[in-house]
Amino acid sequence: MKVLVTGIDGYSGWPLALHLLSRGHEVVGIDNFVTRKRVAEVGSWSATPIPSFPNRQKAVREILGKELTFYKGDLTNYQFVHEVLEREKPDSVVHLAEQRSAPYSMIDVHHAVATQVQNLTGTLHLIYAIRDTCPTAHLVKMGTMGEYGTPNTDIPEGFFETEFHGRKDYLPFPRQAGSWYHWSKVFDSGDVMFASKIFGLAATDVMQGVIYGIRTPEITDHRLLTRFDFDETWGTALNRFIAQSVLGLPITAYGKGEQKRGFIALEDSMQSLRLAVEHPAKPGEYRVFNQFDAAYSVNQLAEITARVAHEFGLKPVIEHPPDPRVEAEQHYYNPIHEHLLALGYKRARDLEEVVREIFHDLLHFRRRLEAKRFVVMPTVQWRSVDSEPALHARLPPTAHPGASSPTTQGSEPTTEHPPA
Amino acid sequence: MKVLVTGIDGYSGWPLALHLLSRGHEVVGIDNFVTRKRVAEVGSWSATPIPSFPNRQKAVREILGKELTFYKGDLTNYQFVHEVLEREKPDSVVHLAEQRSAPYSMIDVHHAVATQVQNLTGTLHLIYAIRDTCPTAHLVKMGTMGEYGTPNTDIPEGFFETEFHGRKDYLPFPRQAGSWYHWSKVFDSGDVMFASKIFGLAATDVMQGVIYGIRTPEITDHRLLTRFDFDETWGTALNRFIAQSVLGLPITAYGKGEQKRGFIALEDSMQSLRLAVEHPAKPGEYRVFNQFDAAYSVNQLAEITARVAHEFGLKPVIEHPPDPRVEAEQHYYNPIHEHLLALGYKRARDLEEVVREIFHDLLHFRRRLEAKRFVVMPTVQWRSVDSEPALHARLPPTAHPGASSPTTQGSEPTTEHPPA
């Protein structure tokens, strides 16, 4: 199959490309490199050094013996999207090219608007470009388990039979997102569902759990590594915990630490996306996959991290600073995830094993963490503080060169090399 | 109370301003006049002549003896929104300034994106500007009954108790909108609900039914009239039916005509918004009002129109062209509407009486309808026609001067005078 991957330069886009290529699929990629720029804006970089995209293509050619077609551009430019789809006419479009950080979306009004506007616009552009150039293409859209929030019931895969005042219907499950970013994914889901209805779009809406890990079987060389973000804005809680351990800092588990979420290993997430691509939705079908493997609480993540850290001679303590997010710190959590199992999904990696592998990689790139050690503590407060002005992300407190000019500090956007 | 009305130059914004002023409230208005421009873009205008805004202010001064403060500007400009709220610090913000046409949003990808982006951005800007300048102000947000679609159950006011797998929760009722425009209102609802949670915003989300009528008790002079759109893009089905009758055209009731929606008279909608303003939500409260008075099917509207038309010596026939929308033509429909009744809402006008009043006004302005008779037939197809290119709004078929230049045809944007 020919698969277009939007956001191919990103954390999951890149290993997806490698995985699909290794399975004999043809891969075409789109990216605007905005993740590299935005991570640099908060003064951070990927713990793993990320080659420029031409060097990534070269590595794929030399190591995997495969060609990777690439278009640099932005999904908010409809002309660009239309031209790429018209030229490539892919069988599937895996849409990963969205602003993906909840804390980033909460910085202030402009980040809130940019997140929702850019994410919505890209998805609408893809919907129309598919309709107009390759109407039978299957859209696999990256959403998030966070769309559902934490209701006091089980969470179905997108739809549920419900009864109200004695009458029944099969309806979309209510969404209760917890950040402007998560809401942007809810909005995407509405638009994709509607496009299936009016345009006959074949669509899989992936409610993605939190992904962990740096490696997949295809990453056989450092030149093929995917990025690993560990700062408070772009890294996940688990990434931060491991980075904190490596840096000799306390592990900061927000609040009571009983907040639960669904998690999945990078390799298993790639397996899941491939299964969606290889078993496409039918025209006019809108299906939802809850794409996670197991649920963990923040405390469980912290404890597993601390346990594995000890194996490496590290002795992090676990602290519980106040939760900057507005979320239930104790809640019921039981999402259903059966659709992928029905397509043959089998867990390949478990959490503790992957945490061990991440420690191994981060210790190797320890100097890159040390160069950015100020970025792993929380800076964005989500709630309103009385009538305080906007929630500005505080700049890093250290005398980091270029700290007053966010776009030039840290690594260069397109070549993230280790420090000299 | 001091009330800021965004979209004060629009169909409901204008009579709301008059109603609030007559009840002793202070009114501040914002508008960018985009409705005037966009109606001109489709070659139409308001059946009622609409004075320029300075002349509207003058009429308010001379006829009602009241002052109306006005700021021309666009809600997508955050600086502007922040400055107006900082200066005025209103007690309530009634947010009516959104792209309000479903067919307009369905024209093509650019109209879809513009509708969703502009509506979302304006709402987010208001949310943040209220938080930062007047955090106790009550936001009354204009949504639509169309957010719910037509589920096979009763429709509650925003939330319902539901059970899934033996556990219960009180959750937002699922939304199933029927156009990009209607989805934009769903998205707004998500953002406003979330703002109540994180910023303590006091919010009333109005699920507005279709409004009918041109007059309220405060409109005692032609200079105070609100607009009446009758074209296929900006007019409601009922408006179009009455205009068709006046023009001697068949009444076009799409499809089987069994589609039901909730309706409310303009005067009663203004009463409802005033009740919301005078009984504000509490800080952090997000409440939803289903703001309609009674449900009617398209056929019922067509029949009432034809019956009243006969009283005026008009003899329209009712036709059933294929439905250009993607909607269930026969469905259950029973939305609940109790919250406004609890605040003292009492129906002042019934449908047939208002239809009679509209006929009276349209016959008076008959020449303005005749000048634009080509705009009352459907031009936008909502569904995809195989792999056809975008759904372009077809230009009017007649040799209308300036038809090739949509922004200059029809009336001037800021002064909608009757033809000489």
Image: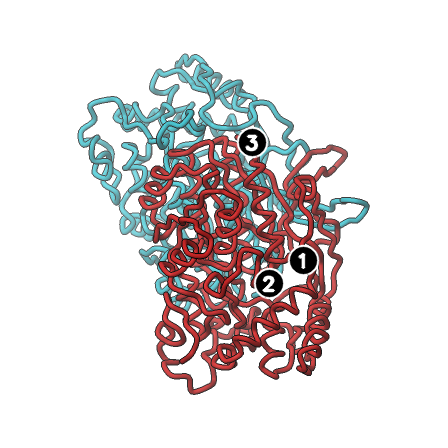
Chain colours: A red, B cyan
Are callouts 3 and 1 both on one chain?
Answer: yes
Q: Which residue is mark 3?
A: A282
Q: Residues within 10 Å of mark 1 (few under 14, many from 20)?
A: some
- SS under mark 3: loop
Q: Identify the residue at horizontal 51%, vertical 20% (top origin).
A: B304
Q: What amino acid type should be assigned to the residue bearing mark 3?
A: Lys
Task: Give left or right: position of A14 versus A328.
Answer: left
On screen, residue A372 above or below B88: below
Task: Give left or right: position of A27 versus B369.
Answer: right
* Residue placed most toward the observer, B389 or A31: A31
User: Percent position (x, y) of residue B101?
Assistant: 42, 38
On screen, residue B179 above or below B242: below
Looking at the image, tell me whether mark 1 or mark 2 is earlier in sequence order.
2
Q: Which residue is mark 1?
A: A349
Are callouts 3 and 2 both on one chain?
Answer: yes
Dot 2 falls on which chain? A
Q: Quadrant of residue B363?
A: top left
User: Percent position (x, y) of residue B150?
Assistant: 60, 33
Observer able to see residue A299: yes
Looking at the image, tell me whether mark 3 or mark 2 is earlier in sequence order.
2
Q: Which residue is mark 2?
A: A213
Q: What amino acid type should be assigned to the residue bearing mark 1?
A: Arg
Q: Nearer the viewer, mark 3 or mark 2?
A: 2
- SS under mark 2: loop
Q: Identify the residue at horizontal 49%, vertical 17% (top origin).
A: B307
